[in-house]
Structures are given as C-alpha cells and as structure tokens.
Amino acid sequence: MKNPEIKKIVLAYSGGLDTSVIVPWLIENYGCEVVCFTADVGQGEELDGLEQKALASGASQLVIHDMREEFAEEYLFRVLRAGATYERKYLLGTSMARPLIAKHQVEVAHEVGADAVAHGATGKGNDQVRFELTYTALDPRLKVIAPWREWDIRSREDAIHYARLHQVPVTATEKSIYSRDRNLWHLSHEGGPLEDPWLEPSEDMYLLTASPESAPDESEYVEITFNSGSPVSVNGESMPPGELVAALNKLGGTHGIGRADMVESRLVGMKSHGVYETPGGTILLAAHRELESLVLDKDILQFKDLVALKYAELVYNGMWFSPLKEALDAFVDSTQGPVTGVVRLKLYKGNIIPVGRKSPFSLYREDFATFGQEDVYDQSDAEGFIRLFGLPLQVRALNGLPVSGLNLAKPDYSRFKRD
C-alpha cells in the first residue's frame, strides 16, 4: 500500500483510541512521516498529555491550535444568527466543528510541507464527508487518507488489540460503551445502549446537564445582550464569545437545560440515535429568537425560517465552504443589524421561559397594540380589510366549490347580496 508520492501526512488527531491507532498504521502502511494536528475547540481535559501520547504513538510532532474564540465567533454565532437547527432538535455542534478543524489542518499541511491529510472518521458517519469536502474546497491537491475505509480493523476490540500489539498508549477498554464528541458548544453521546431508540438513556450518561428532577427548586433569571445578532454579555457582564458560551453552559447545565434525545437522518442514508447536551446553545437560541420576534417584520421572519432549514442542511452535510452557504450568510447578515437588545429568560428544571425583551429597534408599539386607544387605529377600518382578505373564500363559495372535510347542504347563492 506504500505510496512513494506521499512523504508526510497531517492527521486530525484527538488522542482517542481511533486516532492513536491510526498513527502507527499510517507509518506501517504508507512508510512516511506523520504529523499530528489537534484543534482545541473546547474539549477541555481531553487535551491533557496529548503531545506525549502522540509522540509515543510514532508521530514526529504534535501541532495544537487554540481555536475556541474563532469557533465561537465565526462558527457558533454564525449558525446562531441563522437560527439553524437540524431536524428540529440538533444544534449542529459536531457539524460546525469539523470544517473549522479541517481548515486548520490544511493550513498545517501547507506549513509543514505535507502531501496528504488523514482523519479518523468511519465510513458509516457524517464526519468523513465534512472533513473531505473541506479539504476539497480549500486544497484539492492534497491526498486524502481515510483509514476506516482501508484497514481491516472493524471494531473497538480490534483497535485495542492493534494498539497493544504496537505498544500504543491508550486508555480505552472493551468496557467503554459510548462514543462521545465534546466541544465548546455541546457533548454528544452515541453507541452502546443508545443503539436501541426505545430505551431511556441512563442518567449517569449525562455529563454537562443535571436532570430536571434534581435541578434547583428555585428558578434563575438571566439577561443576554445582543449586538447585531451576536451575544455580547450575560447579566450585564461583557465576555469574549468563547467565555460567554462556557458561562451559559455552566448555568444551563445546572438547571437541566439543553438535552436533546433524537433519531436523526445521517447524510450517508441511515438513521442513528443519539443524545446531545447543549445547555448554553439552547439558551442562546431561545434568546435570539425572542429578540428577532421583537425587531424583524413578518416577511423577514417567515423567509428566514425557510433559509434556516436549508442552512442547517448545508452545515450538517459538510457544505460550510459552499457558494450557497456563503450566499445564505450574506442574507442572514443583512437581517441582523436590528437584532440588538436585551432578552430576559427564566430557567427552571429544564425549561426556558421568556419573560422580557427590549431593543432600540423594536417594532412593537404599545399605542398601536393597546385595546384602549382609538386615535392611532380605527377599528372600523378592519371591515374593509377582512372583505378584501376573504375575497378568494367568497368567490370559492359562490362558485359552489366543495370545502374539504365538510358535507353541508349547498346554500342558494342566486340572490346573494353583500350587506
């Protein structure tokens, strides 16, 4: 399998079982230098001891990029402003991280003079597509190596055996039951008991959120300030994007906010069952929607909902750097100028209850909405509006066309006269 044209590979490296095994496998099968690249997107303690582990696995070096602020500002907040949610529940945590990781991986490949890039995504999942579409968009000259599509390793047990055989330091055991992905936005859980969508997930599976039953008995208020669609402060305290998300993760997790148990449609054609914990993101999405309801008109809101569906699909499918995604970003950005203001939410046992919103660009006017004033709104004007708005229904009835679901005797409209 050795390819003389490949002299150096940059591997997207997490330090987990799969990527730890991939290092010696690449050296053994491609006979070239392997540089490990790790993206810090907020996975926390998972980065501890990573360089030592990479070198012990056979890598020539480990390159780490701290991408937490870029991840929050250019990826998380961009999707937040779009209001994008995949299949009604998934807030796209892993989907957003992969193109960012792949982008930096390509940059590292250029810096170290690599001929190829590699990843540890399986041939059944979505991540292989997200990584490889990004490689293609940013540098199609790089050779792409996906070991899971080439090697004979077919299970976690096989990988552990290979690691032991090649003296690769891994902490995984056959007893590990969940496949997890963690970053600044969320923690995902797949595999093990979750492969049966009828079974309720065990409470000890959750790591970021308290159960609603054990959450505090007292509600807690939080105020989030937005500037042109992006959150900038929590309870009046300005924070950098990454720090703001982390603070809301802690707050939301305490109150059992942000759990999503869902069966989703993978890009590769199969259904999968997973559980996501996204406490801060769930709070931010709720707050952003409340503010938009105050400052955006009906047509923009409705069309933006249509855009959000397509936007979520593009992100989920790995099309972050596609022309359509860029065009939709331009539309979303054009709507977000007035999305500036403050939203107050009440958090209680897994619930987010909006209790206040204000903005200098508010479209709400109390003098128009009140039932007690007549000087700005003449209620008699509504009669003509209703007649014109209902004209298609009137014509339908006069022409004797049937109304679905009704079996009524047809009236005699021959002497119809409008009062």
Image (cartoon, rainbow, N blue to C red):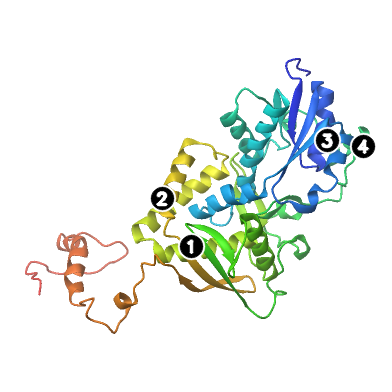
Q: CA distance from mark 2 to mark 4?
A: 55 Å
Q: Which of the two discs, 4 and 1, labels the residue nearer the N terminus?
A: 4
Q: Please report the residue visible at 65 percent of the width from the left and 67 percent of the height from the top.
A: 252
Q: Secondary structure at mark 1?
A: helix
Q: Is residue 396 above or below residue 370?
A: above
Q: Which of the two discs, 3 and 2, labels the residue nearer the N terminus?
A: 3
Q: Amino acid at mark 1?
A: Arg
Q: Which residue is mark 1?
A: 289
> Which quadrant of the view contains residue 392?
bottom left
Q: How far across and down, in percent of the image, does residue 248 sit?
A: 64, 64
Tag of residue 19: none
Q: Which residue is mark 3?
A: 21
Q: Amino acid at mark 3?
A: Val
Q: Amino acid at mark 4?
A: Arg
> Which quadrant of the view contains residue 418?
bottom left
- Closer to the observer: label 3 or label 2? 2
Q: Is residue 54 left or right of residue 368?
A: right
- Closer to the observer: label 4 or label 1? 1
Tag of residue 334: 2
Tag of residue 164: 4
Q: Is residue 361 above or below residue 47?
A: below
